[in-house]
Amino acid sequence: MVDAVVTWAAGWFWATDHEVSRVVLQRGIAILYAVAFVAVLRQFRPLLGERGLMPVPRFLERAGARAGPTLFRWRYSDRLLVVVGWVGLLVALTLVAGLPQRGPAWVPMLAFAVLYLLYLSVVNVGQVFYGFGWESLLLEAGFLAAFLGSDRVPVPTLVLLAFCWLVFRVEFGAGMIKMRGDPCWRNLTCLYYHHETQPMPGPFSAYFHALPRPLHKVEVGANHVVQLVVPFLLFAPQPVATWAAALVVITQLWLVVSGNFAWLNWLTLLLAFAAVSDDVLSSVLPWSPEAGTAADAEGPAWFAVAVLALAAGVLVLSYQPARNLLSRRQRMNASFNRWHLVGAYGAFGSITRRREEVVVEGSLAEDPGDEDAWREYEFKGKPGPVHQRPRQWAPYHLRLDWGMWFLALGSSAQHLWFERFLLRLLAADPATLRLLHRDPFDGQRPRWVRARVFGYRYATRAERRRDRVWWVRDERGVLVDPRRIDRLAQRDR
């Protein structure tokens, strides 16, 4: 009897039909880490470096230990940041290629630990430019991926369940924050506005916005089902769990096509593969890729102990996020510890009804009253010139553009870096200008800069055909009056 129980427990502990899950999770998460480290190498220094808009050394002087675990606490330099970025990128690419997975279980564990710790070091000093829920989501996903083992050991069931619990918190948390938040989610009208007012529209967002309003209500209703009901089915027996994961994947792909939310949607659909069974997948898709079979029927004892320790840690840390899910004062995208593990997630508890954008302009003229001399700086992702069609950027994250969206919403946390941003434009700082799509002065220093607020709406089909524009805008007010470099430099001291 005892032997039978032990055999059953061992058979349950190691999942024998989730090899595809492991391949997708490990390599997919590694791809997104690679994207994140590319963004670090391309954007971190002008935003947060020694001469950045919000320099890390100044932040660490003020924050001290409150910054959380980071390699930069003892010393920050742009050179060290570049080393962190390149090491993270190269380690991520080895995991994408599957090289560490060919060795013992500790090799991919070490590789993911490196990714997690390096990116944690970046996030904890990233301030407003890294204050997004998907930063914590990527960190937690990478931490869990370390315990999936290598091709030489079977997949641990407890780790798959931890991934399903992560998907549950992402989806159910988003569903509950909507039901407790903006009434337009409850009356199914939020998508009358959301495709037009979302932070960074994609190339097809205007077409989604133009869908008939009854279809928008169907979209919202389907979203409620997927976020409030389907997450429970991820823990159901097969094939129900696989079909639940499929619904999550389809919903996230819909969001990928309709907008630009960095890697949030891509990562969520990858995480849903934790519930996908090889047997169910192969019965539906005979051409589905075959994952390698583990050489051993059971993993080494040390690996099993590590998995059990992980499960116990997740269980203990789950108290606060579970309580948060049940609270009427639910917090959105909250980290309950400095390690960004087992947090609370959710998005768009409220929806803006009108789109406003901050338009930044410069002038070479002596007189700022010469309106013909003002030229607009063009950003890569955020709406600007009305003829410019939105581009697809996700899963890449344009941090400056997202900051501009929050600035237009009136976020006070954005104003400090924005004034420094204007100062860099007046100085024609090359690193800052590389964050933009186009500098209208080709590297020449403008005499003046200003920032105006415009209301934006999608152009109708007739307006697109007639005027060849994607947006129609009208001025709402002035955020920053014309400034010269001496006035802005004085305020930056």
Image (tube, rainbow, N blue to C red):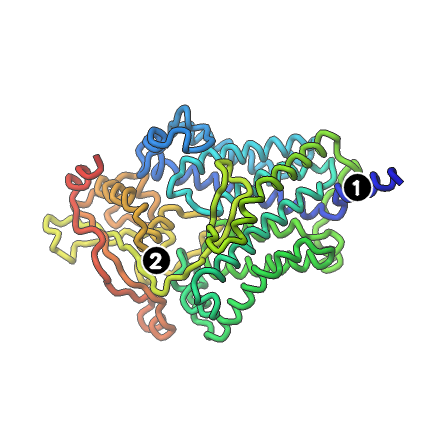
CA neighbours of label 2 inside 10 A, class few (<14), some (14 to 19), many (20+):
many
The reply, left or right, for residue 459 in relation to residue 216 is left
Whole-percent x, y for residue 232 in the image: 64, 57
Discs 2, 1 touching: Cβ within 8 Å: no
Please name the amino acid that badge 1 sits on: Ala
Whole-percent x, y for residue 216 in the image: 48, 70
Give the spatial CA distance, label 2 vs label 1: 56 Å
Out of 380 and 150, give the one closest to the viewer. 150
- Seen at 72% across and 52% down, the residue is 277
Whole-percent x, y for residue 44 in the image: 39, 38
Residue 383 shows which numbered tag?
Answer: 2
Out of 469 and 202, give the one closest to the viewer. 202
Whole-percent x, y for residue 117 in the image: 52, 32
Residue 224 shows which numbered tag?
Answer: none
Q: Nearer the viewer, mark 2 or mark 1?
A: 1
Any part of residue 256 in sight:
no
Out of 98 and 252, give the one closest to the viewer. 252
- Seen at 54% across and 64% down, the residue is 223
> If the image is split into quadrants, where does the N terminus sit?
top right
Any part of residue 292 in sight:
yes
> If the image is split into quadrants, where does the C terminus sit?
top left
SS at badge 2? loop
* Pointer 2 or 1: first along the chain: 1
SS at badge 1? helix
The reply, left or right, for residue 178 in relation to residue 367 is right
Out of 278 and 71, give the one closest to the viewer. 71
Mark 1 lies on residue: 9
